[in-house]
């Protein structure tokens, strides 16, 4: 077994695709409309779905906003340099909600960015966990 994807419901698919591809540098791997179900699925990631886990963005037509809820925590991405990743993300219009630095009660260097729907994405600096 292996993890295939994590699904997030998004209110504006084009805005979310712009964030995940333009700000975080992922690729749009595939996208398909389901008119009878009134939804669209778009899969984004850094590598092909056969090689690693990806994110499924689900847009239910006619729904423009979701609350992330209290059970969901975050998605984690490994980066070479958390401070540089924050600077790059900020320069591309991303919203940093926690600057790069050691995690509380530990030495792992982390940062957090927020996507357009309010989902948190943790950046974990390679070699510090």
Image (cartoon, rainbow, N blue to C red):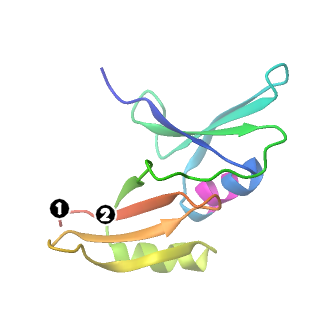
Residues at marks 2 and 1, CA–CA distance in whole angstroms: 8 Å
Q: Position of residue 57 (x, y in %)?
A: 62, 41
- Count the marks: 2
23 to the left or right of 33: left
Say few, some or many: other residues with alpha carbon within 10 Å of mark 1 (under 14 / 14 to 19 / 20 or more): few
Q: Quadrant of residue 121?
A: bottom left
76 relative to 124, above or below = above
Quarter of the image with the C terminus is: bottom left
Q: Which mark is residue 70?
A: none
Residue in the image at 39% along x and 35% along y: 52
* Residue at x 59% of width, y 64% of height: 23
> Does the segment drawn in magenta span residue 126?
no
**Is 129 drawn above or below residue 56 in the view shown?**
below
Marks 2,1: beta carbons within 8 A: yes
Question: Which residue bears the numbered disc 1?
Answer: 129
Name the outermost residue toward the front.
Answer: 70
Disc 2 target residue:
124
Q: Which residues, given as a range, are shown in magenta?
A: 17-22
Nearer-N-terminus badge (2/1): 2
Which element is circle 1 on? loop
Count residues near mark 2 (Cα–Cα under 10 Å), then give few for <14, some for 14-19, many for 20+. many
Q: Give the x, y percent position of residue 63.
A: 79, 44
Label 2 SS: strand
């Amino acid at each position: 077994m292996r993890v295939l994807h994590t699904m997030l419901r998004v209110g504006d698919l084009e805005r979310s695709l712009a964030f995940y591809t333009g700000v975080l540098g992922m690729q749009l791997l595939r996208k398909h409309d389901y008119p009878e179900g009134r939804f669209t699925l778009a899969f984004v990631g850094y590598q092909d779905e056969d090689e690693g886990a990806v994110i499924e963005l689900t847009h239910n037509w006619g729904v423009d906003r979701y609350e992330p809820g209290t059970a969901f925590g975050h998605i984690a991405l490994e980066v070479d340099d958390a401070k540089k990743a924050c600077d790059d993300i900020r320069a591309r219009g991303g919203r940093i909600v926690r600057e790069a630095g050691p995690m509380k009660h530990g030495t792992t260097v982390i940062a957090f960015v927020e996507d357009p729907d309010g989902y948190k994405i943790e950046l974990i600096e390679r070699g510090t966990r």
